[in-house]
Image: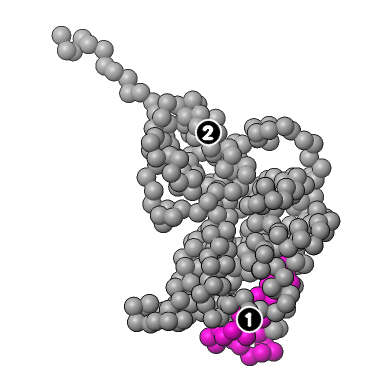
Amino acid sequence: MTSSEPSETPQKRCLVCGGTPNGSRYGALACLGCIVFFRRAISNANVKNCDNNSNCKIGFETKNCCRSCRLQKCLQVGMNPKAIQHRDLIGPRKPVKVEPETQKSKLHHLLELQRKQWSRNQKHQAQTGSFKKQADSDDVRFVMSLGFQNALSWANHFETFTKLSEDQKALVMSEFGIAFILIEQAFKTAEDTEEGCWILQNDTFLEISDTRNVQGQKRINSEFADFLFKTLSEPIRSLQLDKFECVVLKTMVLLSQSFPSQLYLPRFEENRKNCMKTLMKYELRKFPETGSQRFGEIILLLSSVRCAVKQLYNHTKRSDLFNVNNYDAFTRKYIVT
């Protein structure tokens, strides 16, 4: 009879993609592919931004289509970055030369450097009387030069960077300098209560207008400001990123290179791993219940930052405000590669 037939036990599936599960090593049942993906994504801190506004559906057939959405789903189903141990990392193991506590001290030193730099930025704003005026090409030239100077000072706190050749430094700064500038602008914009503008370091702004009603350069610059706001400032505001996390985000961009084939710096790799450990401890201490997920969301911000860097480079070819010819020689040394 039907009542005497044994009921079928539902087959367990990977919570991320629906594949055959391998285990719950990082806190949620997952297949081997998703386990390895999660470990690499968190360890390498290098996941590209989603091109579909983080709306990709992750399944068995589509799991490789978007790394960003796949990592988001890993975090949503309960995979825990804290569960990744140093011994889990792939490849030959090297002795770690920089202790996490040393890295923590360096980050707190950089926190003080950030405070001083922001204080100087405010003095520039006060001297020029630029508060809440729409940015012109002089303002953009000034904040780009100031930003690269501050970014270079930041990078010089890492011995590995100081020992690079000038060409190698220029390669690192071509990405890090722009990222540094955009992160600070995004943080400043996120803290501001006024909507409809992207705020530069000297408190001038790029207006975000309804592009249906504007044309030409105003439309080009408004679309760029809107892209930056949605890509960087909105997630920073949503996370309510604090000043220490801003320090870590800038430092992680410096230490997580996107061009390893051109310049491989193993000491940066060691610093990066220890920086991540410090961030994880900080998040768990500040947010005991949600710290692991918050850590993952901050790591995902790195891909958004790199996407914004590429967008700025593209914008220099279209915009009168950001045209490379407007920059001083110091800035062009790093932005023209």
Q: Secondary structure at mark 2?
A: helix
Give the image quarter of residue 87. Answer: top right
Give the amino acid type for the residue marked by disc 1 in the picture: Asn
Give the image quarter of residue 215. Answer: bottom left
Residue 180's place in the image compared with 294, above or below, is below
Give the amino acid type for the residue marked by disc 2 in the picture: Ile
Cα distance between the residues tagged 1 and 2: 48 Å
Residue at 58% from the left image edge and 77% from the top image edge: 323
Residue at 44% from the left image edge and 55% from the top image edge: 51
Q: Does the image show residue 278?
A: no
Report the disc number at residue 326: 1
Give the image quarter of residue 168. Answer: bottom right
* Residue picked out by circle 2: 35
Of circles 1 and 2, which is in front?
A: 1
Magenta-colored span: 125-151
Which quadrant does the N terminus fall into? top left
Judged left or right of residue 269, residue 219 is left
Judged left or right of residue 317, residue 107 is right
Q: Position of residue 27 (x, y in %)?
A: 52, 34
Residue 241's place in the image compared with 101, above or below, is below
Q: How many marks?
A: 2
> Who is closer to the viewer here, 281 or 264?
264
Q: Secondary structure at mark 1?
A: helix
Q: Does the image show residue 310?
A: yes
Residue 129 highlighted magenta (yes or no):
yes
Residue at 43% from the left image edge and 78% from the top image edge: 219
Q: Position of residue 35 (x, y in %)?
A: 53, 33
Q: Position of residue 297 (x, y in %)?
A: 53, 52
